[in-house]
C-alpha cells in the first residue's frame, strides 16, 4: 500500500536534509585553511536556520545524551560569561566582547538539524573535504612562503590560526585514510602530508607539537591499517617525507634558533621582551588575576586592560594582547572556576566518549567520529595551553564543527531514520492491505550531489 500524501510529504521533507547536510559538511570541512572566516559565515548562517527550525516546531530537538550534557556545560560557560560581565563594571562599549558567546548558544540547535543525516554520508563528506582543504592549504602556503616571501597565514590572515585549522583538517584526512575503507585512501594520506608541510611553513612552533602528538595518536589507533597502506609504498613515503623536510628546513631552523635565543636572553639577562619571555610574563599575570577573582572571574571585557596593566606593573613591558596565550588561563580569568571549569569538564567528557567508542565499537563511522573527537580534544587542550581555546571566530567555529560532527558520528542518533520510522509506523497502523499485512517501508533514496561519494571496498580478511 502507498503512504498517505501527508506521510509522503513528511518523509520527503526529512529526505531533503541528507543532501543539504552533506553539502554543508563538505563546506565546513573544506573552507577553513584556504578561505579563513568564510567557514564562520557558513556555519553561523546554518546555525541561525537550525535555530529557526527548532524554535518554530518544524523539526524536533535531539535528545542524544552526550549532546545534552555538552550543551549544559557550554550553557554554563555562557551564563558565567554573561554574569561575570554584569558583575564587573559593565559598559555598553564593551558589550561586543560577549558576541563570541552566541556561537556556543547555537550548539544544540545545529546538532539537532545536522543529525538529520545518514552517518556514512557525513563521514564521506568530512573526509573528502578535509583532503581537498589540505591540498588547498599547501598551495597557499607555497605561494605565500616561496613567491610572496611572507609568513604563511593562508586565508585566515593569521599564521597561528591557519596552522591550527590546517592541523585539525589534515588530521581528519589522515583519519579518513586509516579508518575508512575507500578508494580515496592514498589521496587522503597525501592530503595529510600536504597539511604537515603547510603547518611547518607557517612557523607556528606550538602547532608543530600539537600536530606531532595528534598524528601519533591517530597512527597508534590505526596502526594495522597503516601497515596495509604502506605496503609497497615505503620508498614513495620516505621520498615524500624527504621533500617535506627539505622545503621546511629553513623555517624549522630559524624558528628553533629564535626559541633558543629567547631562552638564553631571558635566563641570562632576565629579559622578557621576546616571544618566549612575553608568553611567560602573560602566564604570570594571568595566574595572579585569576587568584584575585577565582569564582566568576573578571569578565571578558577587562582582559586587554588587565594584560596591559599587568605587563607594565610586573615586568615594565609595554605590549597589548587580547588573551594570555593560554586558553585555560584566559577562560579562568574571564569567567572563573564556574565558566572555565565547565569547559574543562566538556573536554573530559569528549575524551571519555572518544576513548570509550574506540574501545568498544568496530563500526567504521563511529570510530571515525571518535577520532574527530580525539583531534578536537588534543588540539584544544594541548594547543590551547599555548594559544586560544575560545575567543576567535574561526577557532570558535571549528570548535562547534568538530564537537557536533564527532559526537554525532561517534554516539549520536540519526534524526532522519527516526522521522521516517515514525511516519511509517503511523501510516502502517492506518493503511493495511486486505490480508492485514503492513505496507513496505520506504527505501532509502540516493541523494543527488556533486560531491564524490567514497566507494566502499570489501573489508580485508
Image: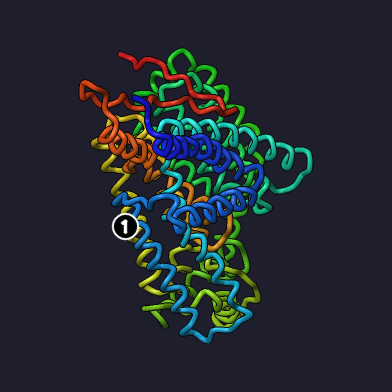
Q: Report the side of 89 relative to 2 (left or right).
A: right
Among the 4 quarters of the image, the one containing residue 321:
bottom right
Q: Specify few, some or many for label 1: CA neighbours under 10 Å numbering under 14, 14-19, or 20 or more.
A: few
Residue 298: percent from left, percent from top: 47, 79
Q: Name the residue: 59% across, 35% down.
A: 134
Residue drawn at 61 percent across, 27 percent down: 243
Indicate the quadrant containing the C terminus: top left, top right, bottom left or bottom right.
top left
Left or right of 263? Residue 420 is: left
Q: Secondary structure at mark 1?
A: helix
Residue depicted at 34% across the width and 43% down the height: 412
Q: How is the image coloured?
A: rainbow
Q: Please say if 160 is above or below 284.
A: above
Q: Position of residue 85 (x, y in %)?
A: 49, 79
Instruction: Evaluate whether residue 117 shows in this view.
Output: no
Q: Which residue is mark 1?
A: 69
**Residue 421 image position (x, y, % from top left):** 32, 36
In this rendering, the answer to whether 265 lies above or below 227 is below
Amino acid at each position: 500500500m502507498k503512504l498517505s500524501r501527508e506521510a509522503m510529504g513528511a518523509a520527503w521533507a526529512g529526505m531533503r536534509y541528507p543532501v543539504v547536510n552533506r553539502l554543508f559538511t563538505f563546506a565546513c570541512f573544506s573552507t577553513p585553511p584556504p578561505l579563513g572566516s568564510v567557514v564562520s559565515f557558513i556555519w553561523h548562517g546554518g546555525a541561525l536556520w537550525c535555530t529557526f527550525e527548532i524554535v518554530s516546531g518544524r523539526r524536533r530537538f535531539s535528545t542524544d545524551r552526550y549532546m545534552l550534557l555538552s550543551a549544559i556545560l557550554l550553557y554554563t560557560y555562557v551564563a558565567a560569561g554573561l554574569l561575570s560581565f554584569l558583575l564587573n563594571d559593565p559598559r555598553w562599549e564593551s558589550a561586543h566582547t560577549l558576541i563570541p558567546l552566541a556561537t556556543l548558544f547555537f550548539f544544540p540547535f545545529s546538532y539537532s538539524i545536522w543529525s538529520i543525516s545518514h552517518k556514512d554520508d557525513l563521514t564521506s563528506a568530512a573526509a573528502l573535504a578535509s583532503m581537498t582543504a589540505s591540498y588547498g592549504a599547501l598551495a597557499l602556503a607555497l605561494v605565500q612562503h616561496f613567491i610572496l616571501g611572507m609568513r604563511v597565514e593562508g586565508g585566515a590572515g593569521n599564521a597561528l590560526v591557519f596552522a591550527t585549522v590546517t592541523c585539525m583538517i589534515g588530521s581528519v584526512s589522515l583519519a579518513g585514510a586509516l579508518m575508512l575503507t575507500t578508494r580515496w585512501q592514498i589521496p587522503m594520506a597525501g592530503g595529510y602530508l600536504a597539511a604537515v608541510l603547510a603547518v611547518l611553513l607557517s612557523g607556528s612552533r606550538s602547532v608543530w607539537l600539537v600536530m606531532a602528538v595528534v598524528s601519533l595518536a591517530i597512527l597508534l589507533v590505526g596502526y594495522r591499517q597503516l601497515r596495509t597502506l604502506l605496503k609497497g609504498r615505503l620508498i614513495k613515503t620516505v621520498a615524500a617525507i624527504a621533500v617535506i623536510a627539505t622545503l621546511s628546513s629553513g623555517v624549522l631552523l630559524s624558528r628553533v634558533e629564535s626559541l633558543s635565543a629567547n631562552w638564553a636572553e631571558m635566563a641570562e639577562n632576565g629579559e622578557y621582551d621576546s616571544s618566549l619571555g612575553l608568553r611567560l610574563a602573560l602566564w604570570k599575570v594571568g595566574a595572579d588575576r585569576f587568584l584575585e577573582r577565582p569564582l566568576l572571574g573578571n569578565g571578558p571585557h577587562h582582559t586587554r586592560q588587565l594584560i596591559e596593566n599587568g605587563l607594565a606593573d610586573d615586568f615594565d613591558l609595554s605590549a597589548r594582547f587580547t588573551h594570555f596565550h593560554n586558553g585555560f588561563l584566559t577562560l579562568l580569568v574571564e569567567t572563573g572556576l564556574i565558566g572555565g571549569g565547565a569547559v574543562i569538564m566538556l573536554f573530559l567528557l569528549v575524551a571519555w566518549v572518544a576513548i570509550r567508542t574506540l574501545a568498544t565499537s568496530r563500526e567504521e563511522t563511529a570510530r571515525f567520529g571518535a577520532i574527530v573527537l580525539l583531534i578536537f580534544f588534543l588540539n584544544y587542550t594541548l594547543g590551547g595551553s599555548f594559544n586560544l581555546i575560545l575567543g576567535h571566530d574561526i577557532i570558535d567555529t571549528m570548535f562547534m564543527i568538530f564537537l557536533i560532527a564527532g559526537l554525532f558520528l561517534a554516539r549520536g542518533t540519526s534524526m532522519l531514520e527516526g522521522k521516517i520510522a515514525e511516519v511509517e509506523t503511523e501510516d502502517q497502523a492506518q493503511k493495511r492491505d486486505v490480508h492485514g499485512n503492513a505496507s513496505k517501508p520506504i527505501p532509502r533514496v540516493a541523494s543527488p550531489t556533486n560531491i564524490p561519494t567514497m566507494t566502499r571496498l570489501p573489508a580485508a580478511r
